[in-house]
Image: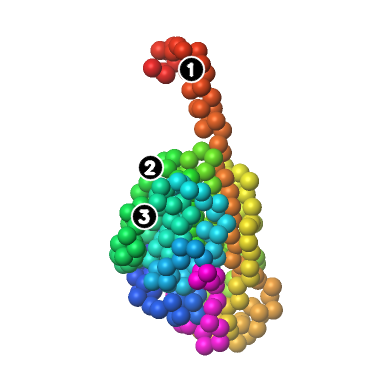
Amino acid sequence: MKEEQQLKNIVKERYAKIAEQGKVENAASCCGATTPSNKVYNIMMDDYSETDGYVSDADLGLGCGLPTQFAQIKKGDTVIDLGSGAGNDCFVARHETGSEGKVIGIDFTPVMIEKARGNAEKLGYNNVEFREGDIDAMPVNENVADVIVSNCVLNLVPVKEKVVSEIYRVLKPGGHFSISDIVLVGELPDALKSDAEMYAGCVAGAMQKDEYLGMLEDKGFQNIKVQKEKPIAIPDDILGKYLSEQELRLFNKGGTGIFSITVYAEKDGTDAVRHNTDESEIKASGSCDPSSGCC
């Protein structure tokens, strides 16, 4: 379609505008990027309104799942939210991690960061912070997060392998993630794959489901599980903007599936176990060999 930086710029520009749209408009379109449907109110998002920690002002209707519901967040955890938007998933995560934990939201759209910080200030949360930056080069040190969550964002990044490598880097050994994303089974028509609006709409940039899961395994993640899967049906009045009548008929009969999946995976905890064991052995012996580097 376009070069990596061009795609990033398209997404950043679109999401600066999307940040100022209403939740109803965003929910009735593809991630707020396309013309809203006049037939379907809610295309991708799941309903957060009954979720503990939900903040209506922070819900822009841009997600495609409820990753925090499956993320197994514990009190005191450090949680990172990738593509944090106006902060909704961060505030839900903060309810789970408690005041003794920490939540970091990362987003590369300045207006989103501004909205999120304003929401956090209104709520009086001093353990939720928002950092401006790319999720494929996170402004976070390695081995920081117990849990990472993300809601319909990885499909917007041109080189998804970079994000997955960054997730592995910033997770603590034994840490895990729960991520909701859009994936495909079958090929999209060229008119959809090449359209910038559909890319920003979380569709054109989506990976094949098998490739997505295989990428996680290739990057070293373990215990990979699809926690939830639901089909996404894009209404004809949206698709008709990009496809001819014949192309639309072929697409609807062609068997291509667009799905929201929520995926869980863990970072290997072997290094952490080995490090703790070595420390225990040193303490038990009451001595330290300087050549081992322990002193």
Foreground label between 2 and 1: 1
Image position of 64 with respect to 96: above or below: below
Residue 269 in the image, given as x and y percentages of width and height: 55, 36
Dot 2 corresponds to which residue?
141
Dot 3 corresponds to which residue?
128
Residue 266 tag number: none
* Circle 1 residues within 10 Å: few <14, some 14–19, many ≥20: few
Q: Earlier in the sequence, mark 2 or mark 3?
A: 3
Q: Residue at x 69, y 73 (%)?
A: 255
| Dominant secondary-structure state across the stretch colored magenta | loop
Residue 23: name its quadrant.
bottom left
Residue 229 in the image, given as x and y percentages of width and height: 64, 64
Residue 187 in the image, given as x and y percentages of width and height: 62, 68
Q: Looking at the image, can residue 57 be seen?
A: yes
Image position of 171 with respect to 7: above or below: above
Residue 252 is inside the magenta segment: no
Q: Marks 2/3: CA distance?
A: 17 Å
Q: Amino acid at mark 3?
A: Val
Q: Total of numbered circles in the picture?
A: 3
Secondary structure beneath dot 1 equals helix
Q: Residue at x 42, y 42 (%)?
A: 144
Foreground label between 2 and 3: 3
Residue 86: name its quadrant.
bottom left
Screen quadrant of the C terminus: top left
Q: Marks 2/1: CA distance?
A: 28 Å
Q: Marks 1/3: CA distance?
A: 37 Å
Q: Earlier in the sequence, mark 2 or mark 1?
A: 2
Boundaries of the magenta span:
33-50
Secondary structure beneath dot 3 equals strand
